[in-house]
C-alpha cells in the first residue's frame, strides 16, 4: 500500500520508514503537534506509556516537527503506530499509518494572487483528489470540514464507494506555530495522514483487520505487490462463539482497559467486545431477558449493542459485555473457548478490580 501511494507522488518526496523509532518522547507525540493538555489521547487509557516521559507513538505526525527542524520540506513517513482501542473488525492495537508534508515558500503563492493558507489548501485538495483517483478510479468525492490540533483549516476526504460514503484520510494546512518552532516563519505547509490497513480493507474488500497479521497462505497468496483490482476471496466460514460477562464497575474502569485485558488473554481469537444494556422502552417497561431484546430487534429490524447497564440503590453500576471469539483459520472447541473465558474473567477481576456477577 505504501508503494502505491508513493508512486502517486512520483517519488519526488523524501521517504522515511525504518529508522524512525516507535518509542518516542511524550513531548514529540503530543506537544510538538499542539495536542491540548486536556485532550483524551494523552490518557493512559488511550496511549501506551513505557514510562511517564516515553510512549509508543500514536501517529506518524509525531515525527513531523523533528523532520521539519532537519530542513526537510517534502516528505512521506510510514510506520507502525499504537493505540489502546476497542476490539472489532476495523480496530487493532497496532496498525500502519502514512504521513505526508509539503512546505511552500512565499514565491510559490505570491504569483497566484492567493494568500498562503488558501494556496496550500487548494494544492492539498488537488494532490489528494489525484491520490484518490489513482487508488479508486473515477469516483465521486467530497470534502468535510473537521478539527485536528495540528492543522487549520482541517479536512476529511470522503469517497462514494460501493454505495456509501467512506472516509479516506484526514488533512489540513499546518498550524503556523509548528512551522515557527521549526524555524520556518515565512512558510506555509500542508499535511495529511491515512491508515494503510483501513485503505487496503476498502480497496481489496478485506472484512477483518486481523487478517493483515495472518501468515495463512490462503490469505497471503491472494495478493501481489503493486496489483490493484484484486478482491479478497473468503476462505473461512468458521462461526463465532459468544460469551457474556457481567460485573460491577468502579470509577477507574474504562472499556479500553477491558479490551487490553481480553486481548492479553485471547489474542487474535477475540473478534469483538460489545457493551450490552437493558433499555427501558416507552410502553414496554424495562427489558430483563435477552429473548425480549431479540424480539425487539426483530420488530424494529435493527441492531442495538447496549443491552445491560444499570445502577442499583447503592449507586453501584453493573455492565454486561458480550465477547465474540472466532478464529480466521479453524474451528474453536467448546473446551478451548470455556478455558479462554475463564481466564478472561480471572484477569478482568484481578487487573481491573471489578466485582464479577
Image: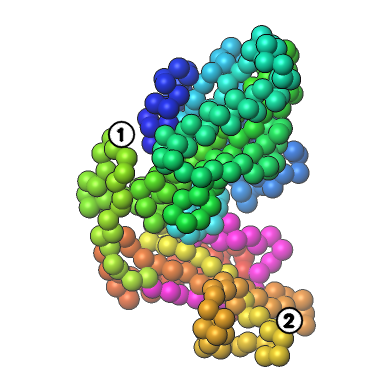
| Badge number at residue 321 | none
In the foreground, 218 or 32: 218
Furthest toward the bottom, the residue is: 284
Within 10 Å of disc 2 (Cα), the crowding (few <14, some 14-19, many 20+) is few
Q: Determine the CA span between mark 2 and mark 1.
A: 58 Å
Q: Residue at x 39, y 56 (%)?
A: 207
Residue 179 versus residue 319 in the image, above or below: above
In the foreground, 255 or 316: 255
First in sequence, mark 2 or 1: give its number: 1
Circles 2 and 1, Cβ within 8 Å, touching? The answer is: no
Q: Is residue 343 visible?
A: yes
Q: Secondary structure at mark 2?
A: loop
Residue 117 versus residue 228 in the image, above or below: above
Q: Identify residue for label 1.
A: 226
Q: Secondary structure at mark 1?
A: loop
Q: Residue at x 31, y 50 (%)?
A: 231
In the foreground, 318 or 74: 74
Q: Is residue 53 visible?
A: no
Q: Identify residue for label 2.
A: 312
Res. 152 image quadrant: top right
Q: Residue at x 74, y 20 (%)?
A: 115
In the foreground, 108 or 305: 108
Res. 236 image quadrant: bottom left
Q: Is residue 330 left or right of residue 42?
A: left
Within 10 Å of disc 1 (Cα), the crowding (few <14, some 14-19, many 20+) is few
Q: Is residue 239 left or right of residue 235?
A: right
Measured from the top left, where is residue 53 in percent x and y?
A: 64, 34
Nearest to viewer (mark 2 / mark 1)? 1
Measured from the top left, where is residue 318 in percent x and y?
A: 65, 75
Q: Is residue 267 left or right of residue 58?
A: left
Q: Tell me, yes or no, whether the highlighted magenta stretch contains residue 247.
A: yes
Segment tinted magenta in the rendering = 241-263
Amino acid at each position: 500500500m505504501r508503494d502505491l501511494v508513493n508512486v502517486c507522488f512520483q517519488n519526488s518526496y523524501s521517504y522515511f520508514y525504518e529508522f524512525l523509532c516507535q518509542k518516542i518522547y511524550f513531548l514529540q507525540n503530543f506537544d510538538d503537534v499542539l495536542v491540548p493538555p486536556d485532550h483524551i489521547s494523552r490518557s493512559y487509557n488511550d496511549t501506551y506509556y513505557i514510562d511517564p516521559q516515553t510512549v509508543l507513538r500514536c501517529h506518524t505526525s509525531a515525527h513531523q516537527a523533528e523532520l521539519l527542524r532537519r530542513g526537510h520540506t517534502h516528505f512521506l513517513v510510514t510506520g507502525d503506530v499504537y493505540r489502546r482501542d476497542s476490539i472489532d473488525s476495523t480496530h487493532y492495537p497496532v496498525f500502519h499509518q502514512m504521513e505526508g508534508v509539503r512546505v511552500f515558500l512565499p514565491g510559490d503563492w505570491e504569483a497566484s494572487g492567493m494568500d498562503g493558507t488558501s494556496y496550500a489548501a487548494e494544492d492539498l485538495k488537488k494532490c489528494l483528489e489525484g491520490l484518490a483517483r489513482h487508488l479508486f478510479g473515477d469516483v465521486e468525492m467530497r470534502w468535510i470540514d473537521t478539527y485536528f490540533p495540528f492543522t487549520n483549516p482541517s479536512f476529511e476526504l470522503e469517497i462514494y464507494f460501493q454505495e456509501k460514503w467512506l472516509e479516506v484520510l484526514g488533512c489540513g494546512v499546518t498550524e503556523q506555530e509548528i512551522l515557527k518552532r521549526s524555524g520556518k516563519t515565512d512558510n506555509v505547509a500542508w499535511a495529511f495522514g491515512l491508515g494503510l490497513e483501513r485503505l487496503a480493507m476498502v480497496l481489496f474488500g478485506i472484512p477483518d483487520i486481523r487478517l493483515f497479521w495472518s501468515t495463512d497462505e490462503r490469505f497471503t497468496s491472494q495478493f501481489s505487490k503493486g496489483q490493484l483490482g484484486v478482491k479478497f476471496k473468503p476462505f473461512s466460514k468458521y462461526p463465532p462463539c459468544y460469551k457474556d460477562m457481567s460485573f460491577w464497575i468502579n470509577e477507574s474502569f474504562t472499556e479500553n482497559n477491558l479490551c487490553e485485558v481480553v486481548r492479553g488473554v485471547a489474542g487474535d481469537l477475540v473478534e469483538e467486545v460489545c457493551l450490552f444494556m437493558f433499555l427501558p422502552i416507552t410502553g414496554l417497561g424495562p427489558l430483563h431477558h435477552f429473548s425480549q431484546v431479540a424480539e425487539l430487534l426483530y420488530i424494529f429490524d435493527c441492531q442495538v449493542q447496549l443491552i445491560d447497564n444499570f445502577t442499583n440503590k447503592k449507586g453501584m453500576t453493573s455492565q454486561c459485555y458480550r465477547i465474540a471469539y472466532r478464529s480466521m483459520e479453524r474451528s474453536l472447541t467448546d473446551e478451548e473457548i470455556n478455558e479462554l473465558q475463564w481466564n478472561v474473567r480471572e484477569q478482568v477481576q484481578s487487573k481491573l478490580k471489578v466485582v464479577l456477577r
